[in-house]
Amino acid sequence: MTIPVERTRAVTATREFLYALLDPKKTPRVPRAIRQWASRCARHYPGSYDLHEAARLCPKSFGPIDGN
């Protein structure tokens, strides 16, 4: 069973992964189509503010970021 802080950590890690896909220095040889797909996903992906609000408004679903 996933606990709220694990769900928040997964969302944060996924955001970091998407941004790593966008950086050719971090992820060389990624096809252009994959970078474009990652860009479309990252454009509206929840940021830190959104996760803080989700944790505040839905504490049973999302936990604090980095223990904050």
Image: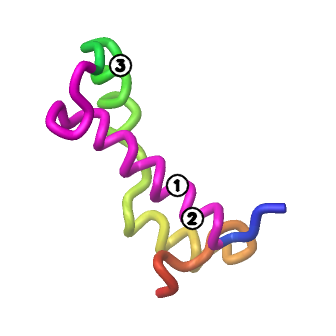
Out of 9 and 47, give the one closest to the viewer: 9
Estimate how packed mark 1 is, as few (under 14), some (14 to 19) or many (20 or more) residues with alpha carbons within 10 Å: some
Residue at the (56%, 68%) spot, across then down = 54
List the residue tagged with mark 1: 11
2 or 3: tag closer to the N-terminus: 2
Estimate how packed mark 2 is, as few (under 14), some (14 to 19) or many (20 or more) residues with alpha carbons within 10 Å: many
Residue 56 lies in what quarter of the image? bottom right
Judge whether 60 appears above or below 33 on screen: below
List the residue tagged with mark 2: 8
Q: Secondary structure at mark 2?
A: helix
Q: Callout 2, which amino acid?
A: Thr
Judge whether 43 appears above or below 50 on screen: above
List the residue tagged with mark 3: 34
Left of 22 or right of it: where is 13? Answer: right
Left of 7 or right of it: where is 32? Answer: left
Q: Which residues are magenta?
A: 5-29
Q: Position of residue 13 (x, y in %)?
A: 46, 54
Residue at the (43%, 53%) spot, across then down = 46
Q: Which residue extends farthest bottom?
A: 68
Residue at the (37%, 40%) spot, across then down = 18
Q: Position of residue 55 (x, y in %)?
A: 58, 74
1 or 3: tag closer to the N-terminus: 1
Instruction: Report if the CB atoms under discs 1 and 2 are less than 8 Å apart.
Output: yes
Would residue 17 be counted in the magenta stretch? yes
Q: CA distance from mark 2 to mark 3?
A: 24 Å
Q: Secondary structure at mark 3?
A: helix
Q: Callout 1, which amino acid?
A: Val
